[in-house]
Each structure stands twice: as structure tokens, then as C-alpha cells.
Image (cartoon, rainbow, N blue to C red):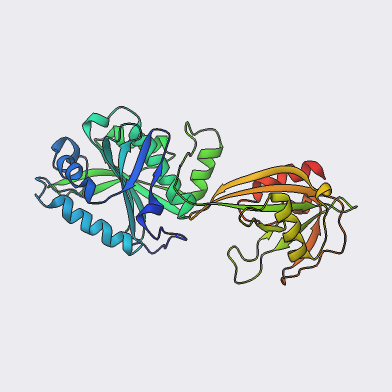
Amino acid sequence: MSDVAPKWFPDTPALAAFSTPNLTLEPFDPSHLDFVQRYAADWNVAQWLARVPHPYPDDGAQTFLNLSQATFEAGEAVRWVVKDRLSGEPLGFVGLDSQRGGWHIGYWFAPHAWGRGVATEAAFHALTFGFWYMELPAIESGVLVDNPASKRVLEKCGFEGWAEGMIDTAHGGTKRHLETTMTRADFDEFVFSGGCTMQPQLDRSVPVVWVVAAALFNDQDQVLVAQRPKGKSLEGLWEFPGGKMEPNEGPEAALIRELKEELGIDVGIGCLAPLTFASFPYPKFHLMMPLYAARKWQGEPTGQEGQALKWVSKFELRDLEMPPADVPLVPVIMDWM
């Protein structure tokens, strides 16, 4: 069990399911038992897996499913069967689980999936899920020394720096083993520095939540930001004022209403200029946020809900701690200032 608890863990298996450009990752369930039993018992696969016994017990897949469900319910592991997105054919297995004080990624694939790049695509997006949704600070992995193909998969996902040791395998014998760790900062740098040949593309069945926000500019070329109050998610962070759109409500009408409720100001629809929008995948929903610019309104903005407000310059704006959905809006707003 890990000493590091994830900041978010899926409440239900459905929240852990996702697709990538070529694959579907489904949380391990009874429909996958035949596939797992068949290939976990295949020596071509098992010889590379230190924790899988061989011969594999007749009830091995069921025992592993019971363990997987129990550890999922405890928030200690999430494991997926990987399928071809078009055909639905099962290809392999990938999982994140807590062990030895940290979180670990492991995977295996059936021989018919080898050499197709699916292991890299699945592992990369499982890492994305762990780092960007669960917000794990670090993820470990390991491979047997005589399995260079698996080592190359991890290297393509951004792992580097290997420590060699010995490991006792479940199918008998002690073997040379390589271990490696990647931090969230390492992963982000790998993804955004250009060294990564893939970009995260997770399609998840979560609700889309629409909110609308405003960049209010004063005569000193400053923009207004509001601080999220205590007791709310992301408390203490600075954001652009606005709020959720109600059913059957247009974005301009919603923003005019929200600015009156939050700031006590009146803004005419003709004073709102569409500026840009944010699209951000939070763990339980996907946020869509149109942003409008305004330079004219009636009244003095005051925090009607107890929130702190302040006017900031473009240089102060870029140094604020903000919700992740607001951060990509900053360069666009700075161009307006």
C-alpha cells in the first residue's frame, strides 16, 4: 500500500474508463475473465511478469479480479483491460496500483498485440490519468533486464534513469531487474518540451459543465480577479468572475446575471465582447468556459458573496495562483492589456 494518497480517485469504475486515438481502456470486470485467464497462463506473456505465477492457477483470473475490485474500492489500484477501439478486440492489460510506499504502473499485452505501438499508447495514457487526474506526485515502474522491448515502452513514455537490482519472481528464481521513477514535473516537461511523440488524448464519458467568465478592464489597463472563498473547491485561487450557465440560458445572459449576483454591477449585452474560451478536463466533468471582455459597466465591483477582489496588471496576473482552467486564458488577456 502507498503512503501517498491520490488527490482524486474515481468513485465508480465508469469514471475510470476512457478511450485514446486507437484504444479503449475498460476497468477490469467479469467480462474480461476469459481473456485475462488465457494470456496470464501463456508463458510467452508470463515469463516477463515477475508477480504472475506459472503455471497459472485455473482460478487465477477470478482471484485477480477479486483483488482488483477490493483494491479499487479501497482507492489503492485501478486496472484496465485494453481493447482495440474499432474492433473491440482485447489486446492487453495496464494498471496503476499502490505498493511499497508509492504508485506503480504495470502492463502486459497478448502476443498478437506486440509490435503495434499499443503498449506505449496505453501506458502513456494510463500515466496521463495518474498524473493529471489522480494528481499523483510520482509513478514507479520496472522491467526485467532481458526484456528490452518493455524498457523501450517506458522510455517512450518519458521514464529515464534506471537502477539495477534483483527481484524474486512468482514463477521461480531471482532475476536481474531495472527500476525507474518519474515525477509529475518530469512528465509535464516531457509532454510539453517536444520530446514526446504523442500528446494526451483521453476521451471520457463525463458531464460537460458550461460556465461563463468575464475579463473586466479598468482605465489603468488592469483586470479584475476574484479569490475563491474558503469551503469551496480550489479555495484561495484567483479566477475571472463569472459562474455556471443555467439550463436554456445563453452565455451573455448568464454572464450579465452572474456579474450582478457576484459583483453587484450591471453590464449591457452590447458591452460584452467574445474574447476566447477554455476547455479543461476535470476528473468528474469537462469544463467549457467562454470568456468575454468588458470595459464599461454600471456600479463599483464589490464581493457580494464575501470573495476578495483585486485589480492586477498584466505582470501581476501571470504570477497569480489560478485554477487550471483559467491559466490558458492569461496570455490572451495579457494581449488585450
Q: Residue 319: x percent and y percent?
A: 71, 53
Quadrant (top left, top right, bottom left, bottom right) of the N terminus: bottom left
- 5 on left or right of 266: left
Q: Is residue 234 above or below residue 185?
A: below
All told, the count of numbered labels is: 0
- 176 on left or right of 78: left
Quadrant (top left, top right, bottom left, bottom right) of the C terminus: top right
Q: Residue at x 33, y 56 (%)?
A: 77
Q: Residue furthest top?
A: 115
- 204 on left or right of 33: right
The quarter of the displayed image where residue 23 is located: top left
Q: Residue 255: in sight, yes or no?
A: yes
Q: Residue 144: in sight, yes or no?
A: no
Q: Residue furthest right?
A: 219
Q: Residue 173: x percent and y percent?
A: 13, 47
Q: Residue at x 80, y 66 (%)?
A: 264
Q: Residue at x 34, y 60 (%)?
A: 76
Q: Between 204 and 272, which is closer to the camera in this rendering?
A: 272
The quarter of the displayed image where residue 336 is located: top right
Q: Is residue 147 above or below residue 169?
A: above
Q: Is residue 181 above or below residue 257?
A: above
Q: Residue 330: x percent and y percent?
A: 71, 47
Q: Between 327 and 89, which is closer to the camera in this rendering?
A: 89
- 204 on left or right of 91: right
Q: Residue at x 14, y 38 (%)?
A: 42
